[in-house]
Amino acid sequence: FAPEFQVGDGIGMDLKLSNQVFNALKQHAYSEERRSARLHEKKEHSTAEKAVDPKTRLLLYKMVNAGMLETITGCISTGKESVVFHAYGGKSATEDKVIPPECAIKVFKTTLNEFKNRDKYIKDDYRFKDRFSKLNPRKIIRMWAEKEMHNLTRMQNAGIPCPQVVILKKHVLVMSFIGQDQVPAPKLKDVTLSSEDMKKAYYQILNMMQQLYKECNLVHADLSEYNMLWHDGKVWLIDVSQSVEPTHPHGLEFLFRDCRNVSQFFQKGGVAEALNERELFNAVSGLNITAENEVDFQAEIEALEKMNEDHVQNHGKKLSMFSSDGDPPIYDE
Ligand code: ADP
Ligand code: MN
């Protein structure tokens, strides 16, 4: 290896590399050398490499070696909590599972800082309750990845446009790539839509939010123009590791925040039909909160959450009040 090439075994770690993995690393080292020679630019060299730790890198190489992924082409996004790569899909080990031609690999970051400010989401999620207290940070990060996988699967089953899960390995989630030829679909915030498409997108999101709530029993909890992609003439939902069930102690607050983001985006975007945040909240949840202003509305939401929590305390289970009697109204163009 060239002296500056990071193979991950230079810091006293006893990594045993199989021949296959070693060869893949060597091959990669050569192509990296060629690439950096081409670029004449030391700084650009291997930013993607540095974004993941040696153990993660090994996990990725193993996927390539197993033939599941053809090549990992590069980094699409580096965020606070995750790094996302693009890859070309390879061959599947089993016949019934087809690997998409292009994949997105989401690597959840394993630093302590981020999990601290996220733990309010997962701590109160009863699905993870028994497991939370005993876990170390590394395992908690894996739970984020697992949660994203479960939530995506629920959405897929409901027919909501979203990435399809390919495989989960520890804190690395492989899913189908939304986009084409290595170019990710633009976020809603970055794309300029005709007023007709804007209106279409709005009604689609309204329907998806209702489906998410009713059929998937989920609140996205980070829904905004940053986590919606425009692809194939429709909106795709991504980034659902933080999504929670509506009866989560803060579930309705999260839903209200989602509604505010969506309402504001489409009202600013000139969709005259767009419901305001309170109307949208009622349309999605099927609840009928009548407060006329934001402060009172929020107070009612918190009162409902508290009522649910008290009920959980007293009876050991959640109230079924969030599932309303009637179906929420269907809004359509
Ligand atoms: P976070 O915002 O927590 O870093 P996201 O899941 O939102 O993580 O992913 C970050 C970015 O990576 C997205 O904004 C999007 O541009 C891109 N991305 C994520 N998943 C996919 C995917 N399946 N297909 C295409 N692009 C994706
Ligand atoms: Mn995101």
Image (spheres, helix red, strand yellow):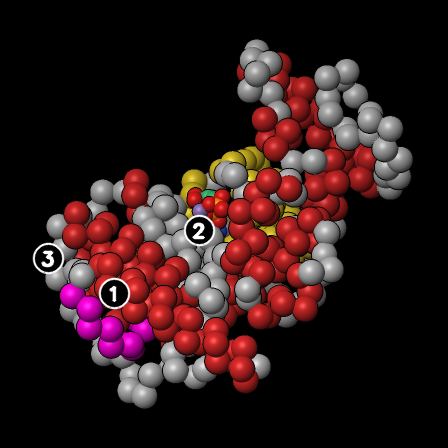
State which quadrant residue 168 falls in. Answer: bottom right
State which quadrant residue 330 falls in. Answer: bottom left
Q: Name the residue under label 2.
A: 178
| Residue 54 locus on image (x, y percent) | 74, 35
Query: What segment is highlighted magenta in the picture?
Result: 284-292
Q: Disc 1 or disc 3, which is closer to the eye?
A: 1
State which quadrant residue 308 falls in. Answer: bottom left
Closer to us: 21 or 137: 137
Q: Disc 1 or disc 2, which is closer to the eye?
A: 1
Q: What residue type is labelled 3?
A: Ala
Q: Distance between the residues labelled 2 and 3?
A: 29 Å
Q: What residue type is labelled 2?
A: Ile
Q: Is residue 62 above or below residue 283?
A: above
Work out which quarter of the rendered image holds the N terminus and state it: top right
Q: Name the residue furthest bottom.
A: 325
Q: How far apart are marks 1 and 2 (CA)?
A: 36 Å
Using residue 93 as the reference point, say whether residue 289 is left or right of it: left
Closer to us: 152 or 18: 152
Q: How crowded is mark 3: few (under 14 residues within 10 Å), some or many (20 or more)?
A: few
| Residue 291 locus on image (x, y percent) | 20, 68
Q: Mark 1 points at which residue?
A: 297
Q: Is residue 92 above or below residue 178?
A: below
Q: Residues within 10 Å of mark 2 (few under 14, many from 20)?
A: many
Label 2, ligand 1: CB separation under 8 Å: yes
Q: Mark 3 points at which residue?
A: 272
Query: Can the viewer see residue 132?
Result: yes
Label 1: element kind: helix
Work out which quarter of the rendered image holds the C terminus and state it: bottom left
Using residue 325 as the reference point, say whether residue 44 is left or right of it: right
Mark 2 or mark 3: name the one nearer the start of the chain: 2
Mark 1 or mark 2: name the one nearer the start of the chain: 2
| Residue 47 locus on image (x, y percent) | 59, 26
